[in-house]
Every structure is written in C-alpha cells, then in structure tokens.
C-alpha cells in the first residue's frame, strides 16, 4: 500500500493549503453568517484546477487521483466546510458519474466544462418520500420520441441554483422497482426545470440546498446516463465515491477544530497555568488527535482502493461513518475547551460543530453506513 504523492501533486496540495489559508479562511465566518454561496471562491478554485482534481487532463481535469482529491477537500474543509462540500458534491456526485457511465459524446460535451469549473454540478436523488429509502422514487420519466418528459421534485439538493448540470434519478418503469430507475443529465435551462425552496440550515450555511421542480421537463433522449433501468446502480456507485468526499470533509472539519483548540489551550490561562498544562486537556487532546489520524487513514485507504479500481464500497462507508462521528466528537469537545468563548461566534469552533453534524446525515446517514458495513460482514 502506498499513499504517497508525486512531487507535482505535493506542489498542487501545497498551493491548495495556501489558497485555503489566504482566500477561504478569511471568508468562512461571513459566508456562514450571511448564508452566502461563495461564488468568487468557486471561480478562483476553477482557475487553480480544484474543480476537477481526479479527472484526466484530456477531459479538462487536473490529472490527479482520488487520494489527492481527499487531501484537497480536507484542506478546504479545515477552514470552511461550505467550500469543502461545494467541491465534493460537484466532483463526486456530478463529474464522476458522467466520467464513469457517460457515452463518449456525453463526456466530450459535459466533462471539460465541469472539470474546469466553468460549470458547477449537482446530484438529485432525494425526494420528500425517498430519503434513506432511495428506491421509493416518485419522479417519473416518460419517453416520447426523441426525448423524455420528467415530472416530480427533489429536495435537499446541494449546489442547486448555482449548478448548470444535475444528475437526476427518475422512474422509467415503476413495475420493475429499483430496476425501473434511470439516470439523466439535466441542464438548468431545459424547459420545465426550476429551482424551488432554499433550506435554512444549522450548518454549511454558505452551501445552497434547494428543492428541484420538474414540470413536464424535456430531456433529450441522448441525455439518458447509462442504460434505462440502471439508474439505481449508478446512484449507489456514485454515493460510494461521494462518501469518500464527505469523509474528507468531516476529516477536515475535525482537524480544523483540533488546530483551533491546540492554539487556544496554549494561550488561555486559568489558575496561573495555560489550559494545555492540565493533564485532562493533554489526555483528551491526545485521544482526539489519534481518532482524527485513524479517520485520515480510513479515508486515504478508501481513496486508494478507488484509484486502484478494486471494490471500495465498505471502505467508503467505514471512512464516512468514522470520520463523521469523529468530527462531531472533536468539534463538541473543541467548544468545551474554549469554555464560554467557544459558545460565541467570535471563535470558529461553534461553526465547526454545526457543520460537523451534517456529515453524519447526508450521502447516507451513519445508520446507512452501518447497514452497508454489516451487510458485507454477514454476507
Ligand atoms: C444539507 C443537505 C444536503 C443534501 N444534499 C443532497 C444532494 O445533493 N443530493 C441528494 O440527492 N440528497 C441530498 N441530501 C439528502 C440526504 O442525503 C438525506 O437527507 C439523507 O439521506 C437522509 O434522508 P431523510 O432526510 O429522508 O431521512 P429519513 O430517511 O427519513 O431518516 C430519518 C432517520 O431514520 C433513520 N432510518 C431510516 N431508515 C432506517 C432503517 N431502515 N434502519 C435504521 N434507521 C433508519 C435514518 O438513519 C435517520 O436517522 C442532503 C440533505 C441535507 C440536509
């Protein structure tokens, strides 16, 4: 096993780290406070190649791999989890399924614009009545000549309203259950497609999360992604990859909270000593950093297996489960270490705690990750 990076990739990562510190971190509190999508950050990331890290140069990507991608999402999320999820949803949930299941024409048409960051991507699977039970899709697609007509709605869609391209799941044959679900590449300007309500969220407040509405939405037949009836498999495979991205986001949030806490406990004095001189502080921080490092190894292992094209579904589920729960634990304790100051918006740890919670919920709740892991154990 080898998680090492080439010299060129190390330089790329160094560039992202500096970008995160200089350009992303200073905006994080304001983006959260005003619930503002940081479009200027996305435009800068596009110029730097961050919107297409694991994709080949011939498709407009940066020519990196999934390990590099996890490191980049971690670096961004360390200072701003909103920025981390914008990149993760775009890369793993929109670019990746087109790369993996698209026809040569679809790849040529969509990937260069997406991986270069000229266009942003999104993924629409969840519906009001189809969350964890994603098979209960009520969006329908009916073929009429050279196009499909889509009717239905999606909720909680990340990047909605800013994305140009949406991967949408819809039933083409309800009688076949999950084998009757198909995937489509839908452009924001297709007739009958619109954006609905924007959610007011606890965390990742700069990330747009909206409803999608399809009312007799016309999708050209050539925009079917994969074959008819293969959509559920495409969605599940896409989420396996997406979980590596969210695990990286959770890892970044956890490391960011550790960084802030270590800095704080060295400075803050009570009883004539810094907080870092109390053994309670030292032992807790040692345990927490050990968990963060364990999460990091799980994340890298899942990415490594994806790069090696060997099965990684269970690895991705373990990485997401452990990284998300670690992020929640670390951020909760980070607030505690900051005392009353941690509860105020003067310090970033309360934002990190709010941001951490979503990593236990989206792209499959922690319960779903446990189902995936157990199913593999007991098969
Ligand atoms: C901010 C945000 C962004 C999102 N982005 C996207 C996106 O870009 N695209 C997209 O398609 N979706 C997206 N989602 C949707 C997200 O993936 C779902 O919210 C999530 O999968 C859970 O579905 P649900 O909310 O319907 O909860 P439910 O399915 O109603 O689950 C509620 C609770 O019950 C538990 N539960 C359900 N079934 C079982 C079971 N069989 N056994 C044990 N426990 C169970 C769940 O684990 C959970 O704790 C997003 C959600 C949010 C909040």
Image (tube, rainbow, N blue to C red):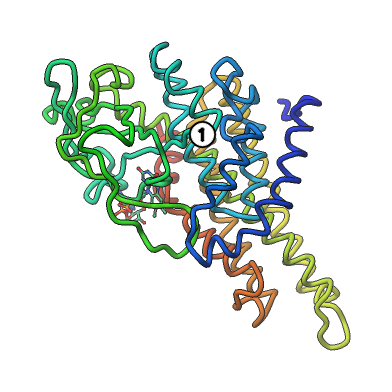
Residue closest to the far bottom? 271
Q: Nearer the viewer, residue 250 or 192?
A: 192
Residue 275 to residue 262: above or below: below
Q: Quadrant of residue 93?
A: top left
Q: Residue at x 59, y 35 (%)?
A: 46
Q: Residue at x 65, y 40 (%)?
A: 72
Residue placed at 39% from the left, 12% from the top? 105
Whether residue 275 sits left or right of residue 294 in the image: it is right
* The CB of the residue at mark 1 lies under 8 Å from ligand 1: no
Residue 193: where, in percent of width, then height?
A: 25, 39
Q: Residue at x 74, y 64 (%)?
A: 285
> Residue 292 at x, y = what percent?
67, 52
Q: Kindly give the residue lying farthest to the top in the view shown.
A: 104
Residue 42, horizontal then vertical, whole percent: 56, 43
Q: Name the side, left or right, on which 370 lies relative to 329.
A: left
Which is more toward the observer, 153 or 115?
Answer: 115
Residue 3: x %, y % from top left? 72, 30
- Callout 1 crowding tier (Cα within 10 Å): few <14, some 14–19, many ≥20: many
Q: Nearer the viewer, residue 19 or 249?
A: 19
Vertical placement of residue 368 versus 305, above or below: below
> Considering the image in quadrants, where does the C terminus appear?
top left
- Left of 2 or right of it: where is 176? left
Q: Which residue is mark 1?
A: 91
Secondary structure beneath label 1: helix
């Amino acid at each position: 096993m080898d998680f090492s990076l080439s010299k060129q990739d190390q330089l790329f990562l160094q560039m992202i780290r500096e970008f995160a510190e200089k350009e992303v971190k200073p905006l994080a509190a304001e983006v959260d406070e005003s619930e503002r999508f940081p479009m200027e950050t996305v435009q800068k990331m596009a110029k730097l190649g961050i919107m297409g890290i694991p994709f080949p140069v011939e498709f407009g990507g940066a020519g990196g791999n999934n390990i590099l991608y996890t490191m980049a999402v971690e670096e961004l999320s360390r200072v701003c989890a909103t920025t981390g999820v914008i990149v993760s949803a775009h890369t793993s949930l929109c670019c990746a399924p087109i790369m993996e299941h698209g026809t040569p024409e679809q790849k040529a048409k969509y990937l260069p614009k997406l991986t270069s960051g000229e266009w942003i991507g999104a993924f629409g699977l969840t519906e009001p009545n189809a969350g964890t039970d994603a098979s209960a899709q009520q969006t329908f697609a009916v073929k009429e000549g050279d196009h499909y007509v889509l009717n239905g709605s999606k909720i909680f869609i990340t990047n909605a309203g800013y994305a140009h391209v949406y991967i949408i799941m819809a039933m083409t044959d309800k009688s076949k259950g999950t084998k009757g679900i198909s995937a489509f590449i839908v452009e924001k300007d297709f007739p009958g497609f619109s954006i609905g309500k924007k959610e007011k969220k606890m965390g990742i407040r700069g990330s747009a999360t909206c409803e999608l509405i399809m009312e007799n939405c016309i999708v050209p037949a050539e925009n079917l992604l994969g074959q008819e009836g293969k959509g559920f498999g495409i969605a599940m495979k896409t989420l396996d990859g997406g979980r590596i991205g969210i695990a990286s986001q959770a890892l970044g949030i956890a490391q960011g909270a550790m960084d802030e806490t270590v800095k704080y406990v060295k400075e803050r004095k009570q009883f004539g000593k810094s907080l870092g001189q109390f053994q309670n502080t030292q032992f807790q921080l040692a345990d927490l950093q050990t968990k963060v490092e364990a999460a990091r190894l799980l994340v890298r292992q899942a990415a490594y297996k994806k790069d090696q094209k060997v099965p990684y579904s269970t690895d991705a589920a373990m990485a997401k489960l452990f990284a998300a729960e670690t992020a929640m634990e670390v951020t909760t304790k980070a607030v505690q270490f900051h005392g009353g100051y941690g509860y105020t918006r003067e310090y970033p740890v309360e934002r990190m705690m709010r941001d951490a919670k979503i990593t236990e919920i989206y792209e499959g709740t922690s319960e779903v990750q446990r189902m995936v892991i157990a199913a593999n154990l007991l098969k």
